Image (tube, rainbow, N blue to C red):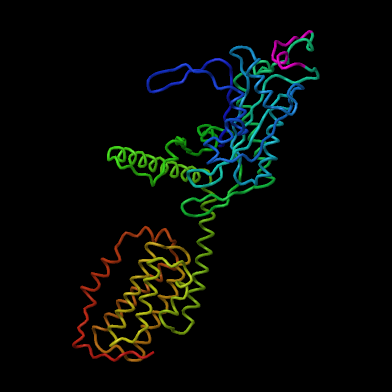
Amino acid sequence: MYYFDYAYTGKGTTKVKSKTGTKVKKAPSCKNRFHYITRTAHYKNHKDNLHEKVEFVKSGNMPSFAEKRPDLFWEATHNYERKNARTAASQVIALPKELTVQQRIELAEALIKKFTEEFNFPYTAAIHNHTGEIGGQDQPHLHIMYCERSVDEHNRTAEQFFSRYNDKDPASGGAQKITPDVRGKGKTIINEMRVDTEVIINEHLEKYAPTKIVNIKGIDVEVPNTVSCLHHEDYNRIHGTNLKPVPMIPKSLLRLDPDLTFRDKDKNAAYQAKLAERERAINEVNDLREYNNYQLYEHYYLETKARLAADQSASRAEIMRTASESQRCSALEACKYFQELPQTPLIARVLELSAIEDKPQHNIREYIEAIKQKQYAIIDVLKNEANEPTIQASITALSNDLKTYQIFENKGYIRDQHERNLLKLDREFVQNWLDDLATCNSNDLLDRQESTVKNQQENSKNNREIDKEIDNSPRPDF
């Protein structure tokens, strides 16, 4: 699916619906539209220029009276075309953002040629591009406006060009007007135009950008880069999908300033309500886009997910093998991968507690407790900032803890049953997490609902009471 709009600009009046009813206004002129898409005259400093840039402008097939002066042509169209006549046909076509500016221009020229060359229609076209308010990606689109009067070999004045065509003596009349009805297509022409546009866009995508990346459920998936002219309901019927329509959010809502506040309490409350509506609308659009992407690319998503899982499993297995074969090191050395990550408060806490663990403790129980506090910090990272780098860093750090526990036993530091129980609980805790980390994905960890703080409190209450007065265990010496 892609955006394609086809409309007419005409002389006369148009009806506009408003809160107070239907109003009759002057129809927008083709002259005004020309200046809008080219950003000339009174549109040179238009407010839309703050959000949008013009990448390409081209006019062609101009009659002799307006050669190299498209502004004169569209002014003449507005002045001399008969009353209530159509002055221009207009198309707005979304262009693929995966193409470069030059590739978009090449595509635009192919589309212009398709819709204007056969009957030598005078045209003006422009590519506009702005950053999307949702997602922050480029939104390039092509404007084409063309007059349905065919330019032939006869030279005419501006006034004559727009007079009635004389089929018996073309030189004495105006230029022939070739409308969809004259071509025998009527309203069905828009369907033909959409199909032609699909074919041309897909040809250029195949040439320059045959695949694209879409993010589905947190995974970047490479998929074929094609467009379809079908409405989502027709696409669903043909392909068995369940695509849903994505609503358009008004610019007036999208461009609200989230940081703006007002001193007036009522005015500020009303503005905050609009911001809440904006956020709701944006979330709805994002959810629908991801849902539709899954409908379109489920097969590619599942393939990518399986491949990533296999790669992650192999990578983690190698990390676990390396960790198990290496010698026990200090807590900070074991957290070297955490040191290479962006230093969020949670990761900084892991490193802080690792440094505390490495300091001399009074007895074995204080060592065990220091190790445990660091482990809780690691689990907090996994539950809030889980990704492949944090998972791999956690595997290395926790594997080192198992070696530390083994040294405690081998060197006879564990002297009573309470210490043995503590060590057994901690070893099982670490081993269970390592088993989970060997196969889980980051979403599994982020979705866990149990509270680390609650577990810490329960563990301390039931199993981790330290009576320093009776603890005469030796101080470990590494």
Residue 166 in the magenta stretch? The answer is yes
Q: Quadrant of the N terminus?
A: top right
Q: Is the residue 372 above or below the residue 410 in the image? A: above
307 and 87: which is toward the camera: 87
User: Seen in the image, is 215 located left or right of residue 228?
Assistant: left
Residue drawn at point x = 29 percent, y = 91 percent: 474
Dominant secondary structure (helix, strand or loop) of the stretch shown in magenta: loop
Q: Nearer the viewer, residue 282 or 256?
A: 256
Compared to 102, does 159 lie above or below? above
Q: Looking at the image, is 467 positioned above or below residue 384?
A: below
362 relative position to 112: left or right: left
Q: Quadrant of residue 77?
A: top right
Q: Which residue is farthest right? A: 153
Q: Which residues are magenta?
A: 156-168
Residue 348 colored magenta? no
Question: Residue 156: percent from the left, percent from the top?
Answer: 76, 16
Q: Position of residue 82 (x, y in %)?
A: 63, 12
Rendering coords of residue 236 (x, y %): 51, 35
- Identify the residue at horizontal 51%, vertical 38% (top origin): 240
What is the quadrant of residue 470 in the picture?
bottom left
Q: Residue at x 70, y 19 (%)?
A: 149
